[in-house]
Image: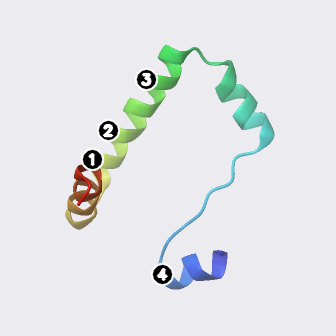
Amino acid sequence: MVDLLKKLGGFSYHYTGDQIREFQKLSYAQRLEWVIKTNNFLQKFMPLESKLTWEKLRRGE
């Protein structure tokens, strides 16, 4: 899988069990805030082509 991602120019990320447990300790409001901030960050730096593709997927196209 990693070789395929490298070939396609993608990436992967691994969360440790400790990282997941720390996230689980957050309240639902804190988790939602994290998701919103992460989405805003991605939208700010994402190439236009990727944004357009993302919007098509969200609309089910």
Q: CA distance from mark 1 to mark 3?
A: 17 Å
Q: Residue at x 35, y 48 (%)?
A: 42
- Label drawn at residue 40: 2
Quadrant (top left, top right, bottom left, bottom right) of the C terminus: bottom left
Above/below status of 46 relative to 10: above
The mark lying in front, picked from 4 and 2, is 4
User: Left or right: where does residue 50 sit relative to residue 22?
Assistant: left
- Label drawn at residue 33: 3
Residue contact at pointers 1 and 2, CB within 8 angstroms: yes
Residue contact at pointers 3 and 2, CB within 8 angstroms: no
Residue contact at pointers 1 and 3, CB within 8 angstroms: no
Q: Residue at x 62, y 57 (%)?
A: 13
Q: Secondary structure at mark 1?
A: helix
Above/below status of 48 relative to 38: below
Residue contact at pointers 4 and 2, CB within 8 angstroms: no
- Label drawn at residue 44: 1
Above/below status of 9 relative to 57: below
Quadrant (top left, top right, bottom left, bottom right) of the N terminus: bottom right
Report which residue position mark 4 lands on: 8
User: Left or right: where does residue 5 sit relative to residue 46?
Assistant: right
Give residue 56's quadrant in the image: bottom left
